[in-house]
Amino acid sequence: MLKIITLMLVVTNIQAAQPVIVKTPEMEVDFTPRTANQMGSFYEARGFPKAMRDVLKQQCFITVGIQNTSNEKIWLDMSNWRFTAGGKPIKRKHRDYWKQRWQNMGVPLSKQSTFRWTLIPETLDYLPAEREGGNILLPFSDKPISITATFATGENKQGEKIVITTDKLLCAEDVEEDAE
Amino acid sequence: MKLKQTLTLLVFVLSLFSSLLLNASNSKVPFGLRHYDIGSAQNFTLNDIDGEKFELNNSKGNWVFLHFWASWCGPCREEMPAIQQLADNMKGEKFQIVMINTAEDEDTVFEFLGSINVDLNSLLDVDGLVTEVWKPRGLPTSFLIDPKGKVKYQAIGGREWGSPIYVNFLKKLLKPDDKL
């Protein structure tokens, strides 16, 4: 009798959530969706408590890299970013939200600190050629995510604004497949 | 006679101009290092991986290279050999390298530093509280603090600290007569 062994394979859904790179003459911004397993593994390796990881696995992680390719200073201010999923506005979870949540859960300070480092800074100025980034956490959605990000430029933020948009992002999902 | 006076004046103007140019090029801050005059450095006391207590205020009289890092941060890991080179190049100078590991435990830091073959010690900011006070804008971040205890420069991200452009700049900082 043929034994049928069912294996649960967890694979990364790389087709559904590809990195997106947006280039303008002044800057380059890349967006890389991360799966729950990718982020879970990262945080597990850093000794994050299971309760914390369980919360994080439910989020839509997008790693953002920003490079200033101009000769002017460029200013990141996350309050000038807008997000939608399937055309409806969604709210990015601010680091203050996470701070409060981790405090309420009694997460050790060291883990709170490490988590904070994985987030994109709320504000940052980029000198010419500088590159920095971090993670954005959004409510998970199976609908296309669009991002519109506005950046001030110039020493005193008086320069022409740069607006970058993308509507090609999807939250990355770990797909469970049955194999026989 | 008039021609001689004109020529003398011309030589004087030219030499003044070239001297100004030379000064300007000597005082140029290398790429990736930015002026960061925020006043007095916030004092802190932390233990290093050998359990020795370190207080920042005791370093007055030296330039201090204050470096925030974590072993999970890729650029931090890549940068370590460059910091070792910097330490080698600045040996015997009034220049102190102070590394602060952000929110990792002693074993992790000890194992990591041992595994990459560097002769560097690190302070342990186990709860990340000193890091919270200093608010580096990313990891790794390095600050340069002058002998009076004033923060003067900041570098966000990894740098080739052992390369001549940085070493020469830092050695020049140690000469109080040279303006930077």
Image: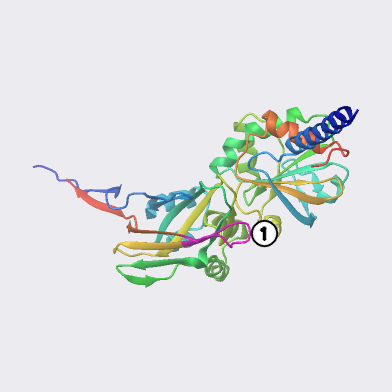
Identify the image quadrant of the N terminus of chain A.
top left
Foreground of the two, A94 or B114: A94
Q: Residue furthest front?
A: B1
Residue at 76 percent across and 54 percent down: it is B37
Residue at numbered disc 1: B132
**Along the horizontal axis of the image, is B126 left or right of A117?**
right
Protein chain holding label 1: B
Foreground of the two, A45 or A121: A121
Foreground of the two, B127 or A122: A122
Provide residue A146's location: percent of width, then percent of height. 35, 62
Provide residue A174's location: percent of width, then percent of height. 31, 53
Instruction: Report whether residue B119 is seen.
Output: no
Provide residue B143's location: percent of width, then percent of height. 72, 47
Identify the image quadrant of the C terminus of chain A.
top left
Provide residue B42's location: percent of width, then percent of height. 78, 56
Amino acid carrying mark 1 in the image: Glu
Answer whether residue A153 is magenta in the image. yes
| Residue B82: quadrant of the picture | top right
Q: Magenta segment, principal secondary structure?
A: loop
Residue at 88 percent across and 27 percent down: it is B4
Instruction: Report whether residue A53 is seen.
Output: yes
Residue at 53 percent across and 70 percent down: it is A97
**Along the horizontal axis of the image, is B76 left or right of A146?**
right
Which range is magenta? A150-162
Q: Is A151 placed above or below B139 here?
A: below
SS state under label 1? helix
